Image (spheres, rainbow, N blue to C red):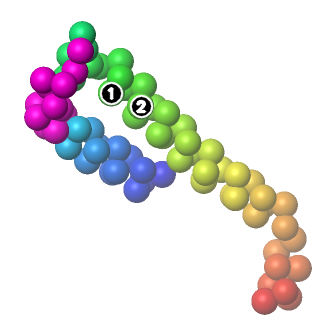
Amino acid sequence: MILTVIGEGAGLVAAFFVTRFIEGLLYNVSPTDPPTFIGIALLLILTSLIACYVPARRATRVDPVTALRAD
């Protein structure tokens, strides 16, 4: 999750500056629309959290002795 937060921060800063170049292409939306920035950031964080949680949850169900013997 640390990498996700770092990536989110870098992506938001980059997106903030890149929107200035495409400002002419947007129709009835400000280049730095806060609901869009916040919504997409939360969606990406939620997706990353689920992607981290599911394998971790599955790993907690395996008996450590069985896992070590399998290797």
Relative to 70, does residue 16 appear above or below in the rendering?
Answer: above
Which element carries disc 2, helix, strand or loop? helix
Provide residue 57's location: percent of width, then percent of height. Answer: 74, 54
Crowding at dot 2, Cα within 10 Å, few <14 / some 14-19 / many 20+, comes out as some
Q: Are marks 1 and 2 in contact (CB under 8 Å)?
A: yes
Relative to 8, does residue 42 appear above or below in the rendering?
Answer: above
Which element carries disc 1, helix, strand or loop? helix
* Residue closest to the eye, 23 or 55: 23
Provide residue 62's location: percent of width, then percent of height. Answer: 84, 67
Q: Is residue 24 magenta?
A: yes
Q: Amino acid at mark 2?
A: Ile
Reading the image, the residue beneath label 1 is: 37
* Residue closest to the eye, 68 or 23: 23
Q: Residue at x 33, y 27 (%)?
A: 37
Q: Amino acid at mark 1?
A: Phe
* Residue closest to the eye, 6 or 31: 31
Provide residue 32's location: percent of width, then percent of height. Answer: 21, 23
Q: Give the number of marks.
A: 2
Relative to 9, does residue 43 appear above or below in the rendering?
Answer: above
Crowding at dot 1, Cα within 10 Å, few <14 / some 14-19 / many 20+, comes out as few
Q: On the rendered structure, is 61 left or right of 41?
A: right
Task: Tell me the magenta residue range.
Answer: 16-27
The mark found on residue 40 in the picture is 2
Q: Residue at x 88, y 79 (%)?
A: 66
Q: Residue at x 42, y 25 (%)?
A: 39
The answer for how far apart the CA atoms under marks 1 and 2 are is 6 Å
